[in-house]
Image (cartoon, grey):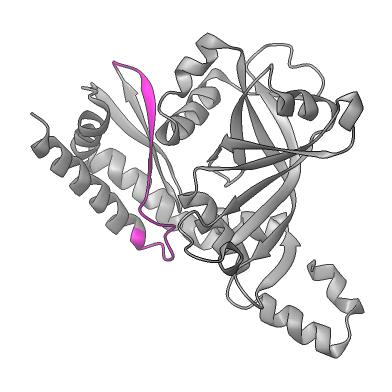
Amino acid sequence: MMADDTETLDPESLAADKAAHRGDPGLDVLRWLHRTHHGVLGTISTERRVQGFPTGSIVPFALDDRGRPFVFIANIALHTKNLRRDDRASLFVHDGQAVGDPQGSWRASVNGHFVKLTTAAEAGAGCERISEQEYQQLMARYCERIPQAPGYAKTHGFDFWRMNRIESIRYIAGFGRICSFKGLDYLTHAEPSQFEAMRTGALEHMNEDHENNMKEICHAFHQVEAETVQMVSLERTGCLLQTLNPDGYYYHSFTKVIDEPQEFKSEIISLLQRARKLSRSTP
C-alpha cells in the first residue's frame, strides 16, 4: 500500500501495513536489482488483436548511477514498439536462487515510465538526448552484466531505454511482508546524502594516490594497459573507471550494496584483491 493511502486504513489494516514495511523495503529492492541481471519487462500491447493487454519479455538490465534501471533493446522488438506508443512499463525481478515454493521468496515489480536515450542531435518526441560520454558510461555498466552487448548494435538497431521516472514499487519479501511504496523511497537509497562526503573524499584519494592499483584492475579484468586511469563515479553498488590511451569506461560492481560509508574502502580493496588473484591465475 502506498504511504499516502494509510490515512484511510482502519487500525487492524494499519498494523498490517506497518508490519509489511518493517525493515527497509527500498533498500531491499536496491539489493535485489544489484544482484539480479535480468527480469521481465511488462509493456502494454499495441497490436490490434491484443491491444491494451500486458506483454512480458525477459530482458537483461543494468542500473545507472542513480539506481534507475535501463535496458538495451532492439528497434524491431515488440516491447520496443509498445514503449514507443505507451511509455508505461514494469520491470519484475524475483529470487532466482529460491528453492521450493517460489512464492515463499522475494520478488518486486518496479513500475514507471521509460524513455529512449539517444546521442542524435535531434532527439525527437519521447526521447532524451544524452552525450556520447554518457552513452559510453551506460554501455560500460551494461557490458559488465552482458559482455556481448556491443555486438548487438551491429546486428540490429539497438538503443538504451531507461526508466527515468519510477512511480511505484510492489514489494513482496515473504509472508506478511507485502506492500507498495513510491519510487522516491527507493531512489533515496541509491543516492543517500550521508554517503556524499565520504564518496567525494574516496574519489579524490583513489585518483591522487591509487592510480597504479586501478591500472592493475583494468589489466586483470579487461586486458587493458592504460596510460591513465581515473575513477569517475563511486556508488553504493560499484565504481566506474575511465581509461585514456586506450580510451574506455569500465564498471565494477561491489560484492554487495554497502551499508556504511566506511565500506567503500573495504569493497575497493576486495576488488583489487580479486584482480590480483585473477592476474596470478592467468598465464
Q: Quadrant of the N terminus?
A: bottom right
**Magenta region, residue range:** 245-263
From the viewer's side, name the closer residue of 90 and 56. Answer: 56
Q: Position of residue 10 (x, y in %)?
A: 89, 86
Residue that appears at 85% across and 39% down = 53
Drawn side of residue 149 relative to residue 254, left or right = right
Drawn side of residue 57 relative to residue 255, left or right = right
From the viewer's side, name the closer residue of 103 and 237. Answer: 103
Report the label total: 0
Residue 6 vs 243, above or below: the answer is below
Drawn side of residue 206 relative to residue 239, left or right = left
Residue 89 vs 94, above or below: the answer is above
From the viewer's side, name the closer residue of 169 and 49. Answer: 49
Which corner quadrant of the image does residue 22 belong to? bottom right
Drawn side of residue 245 relative to residue 25, left or right = left
Q: Position of residue 125 (x, y in %)?
A: 82, 20
Q: Position of residue 142 (x, y in %)?
A: 48, 32
Q: Residue furthest bottom?
A: 11
Residue that appears at 26% across and 25% down = 228
Is residue 26 highlighted in magenta? no
Q: Main SS of the magenta segment?
A: loop
Question: Can you see residue 80?
Answer: yes
Residue that appears at 66% across and 78% down = 176
Residue that appears at 55% across and 38% down = 61
Is residue 257 highlighted in magenta? yes
Question: Can you see residue 191?
Answer: no
Q: Quadrant of the C terminus?
A: top left
Which corner quadrant of the image does residue 2 belong to? bottom right
